[in-house]
Amino acid sequence: MYIIYLRLNIKKKQFFEYLQGEAEAGLEGLHQCAEKELMNYLNSDGPSKDFNDFLTKLAGLTSETRNYFENLVRELENGLSDVDSQAVCNKMSSKTAAGTSKSKGERGKGSSKTGTSVRNADDSGSWACDKCTYMNSRSAAACHVCNHRN
C-alpha cells in the first residue's frame, strides 16, 4: 500500500525500494545461516571446533538484519525524509549500476543500540552506514548514498 503513495515521489520510491531490498537480502543471509548452516552442526557426530565461529556469525547476521529493518521502519515513520533531493537517488542508482552495491556476502557490522555507527570493516574493507545501511568503502568519511557522517 505504501508503494502506491510513493508513486507520487519517484525519489522516495527508489529509496524505499533500496532499503526494502537491503532488509530482504539481510534476512535471506540470516535464514541461510540459521537454517542451513546450522544443519551441519546438528548432523555432526561430536562437538565442532568452529561452532563458536558459527555462533558469532549468526549473532552478527541477526544484529545486522535488525539494523536493516530498524532503518527501514525509521525511514517509513519519518516519511523517507532522508531523501536528499536528486543526489541520494543518483548516488544509489549509480552505485547499483556500477555493481558496487553490496552483495549477500558483503555486509557491515550494523550499528549499536545508541544509533552510532559501528565502523568495523568487513572482509571486503567496507562499512555499513547506520542510517541507510549502504556499504561504503573504508576510506569514506560519509555515506555515499545519504551523506550521513559516521
Image (tube, rainbow, N blue to C red):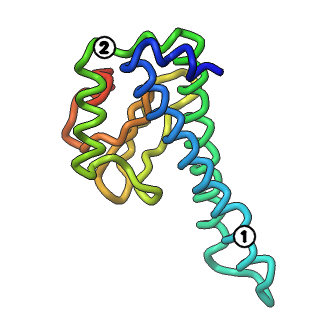
Relative horizontal placement of residue 63, taking residue 80 as reference (left or right): right
Location of residue 58 with respect to 1 vertically, above or below? below
Screen quadrant of the C terminus: top left
Image point 64% across, 63% down: which residue?
33
Place of residue 24 in the rendered image (x, y in percent of width and height, measured from the top left): 58, 44
Relative horizontal placement of residue 79, taking residue 52 as reference (left or right): left
Marks 1 and 2 sit apart, C-alpha to C-alpha, by: 41 Å
Q: On the image, numbered disc 1 is attached to which residue?
A: 38
Relative horizontal placement of residue 58, taking residue 109 as reference (left or right): right
Image point 29% across, 23% down: which residue?
88
Q: Residues within 10 Å of mark 2 (few under 14, many from 20)?
A: some
**In front here: 122 or 68?**
68
Place of residue 136 in the rendered image (x, y in percent of width and height, measured from the top left): 29, 40
Place of residue 80 in the rendered image (x, y in percent of width and height, measured from the top left): 47, 14
Location of residue 94 with respect to 141 vertically, above or below? below
Dots 1 and 2: beta carbons under 8 Å? no
Location of residue 28 with respect to 10 vertically, above or below? below
